[in-house]
Amino acid sequence: YYYQGRVLHNAQNYNAAIVSFTKAEEFAEKAKDNKYIGLACRSISHISNETYQFAEELKYAEKEEAAFRKYGDYDYYGHAKFDLAVASNNNMDFERSEKL
């Protein structure tokens, strides 16, 4: 479902991409795979940013950051912190954004 979501996202078919990424997140949670939880949440956060759904962007950026923190890969975690800073800024939480 994750890669299907990537294809749909690249085609700007956002509604179908969200459905695929949500399914990917559900399967990753069942498998306790923090890498794919993070990737699915990152993608949903990015789509939410592109469609000006900033509350959803923040929700999924937080889930992305938590998953990649558990996964333990510095590169993924660093990108997640950046996404969380952007989402915080878009939600007018400038202090949090600057701290990240």
Image (cartoon, rainbow, N blue to C red):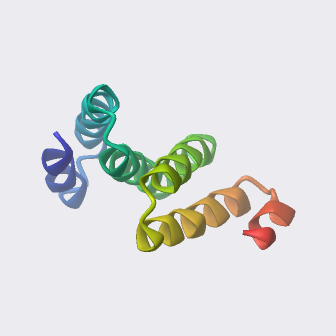
Q: How many marks?
A: 0
State the residue in front, 43 or 49: 43
- The outermost residue toward the right is 95
* Residue found at x 13% / y 46%: 4
Figure quadrant of the C terminus: bottom right
Residue drawn where x is 50% and y is 65% of the image: 77
Q: Position of residue 68 (x, y in %)?
A: 46, 55
Q: Position of residue 76 (x, y in %)?
A: 42, 66
**Is residue 61 rendered to the left or right of residue 92?**
left
Nearer to us in this view, 97 or 47: 97
Is the N terminus in the top left, top right, bottom left or bottom right quadrant? top left
Left or right position of 91 against 44: right
Of residues 65 and 56, the one nearer the viewer is: 65
Residue at image position (20%, 45%) is 2
Left or right side of 56 for 46: left
Residue visible at 34% across and 31% down?
Answer: 29
Q: Quadrant of residue 17?
A: top left
88 sits to left or right of 82:
right
The percent coordinates of residue 56 (x first, y second) are: 56, 40
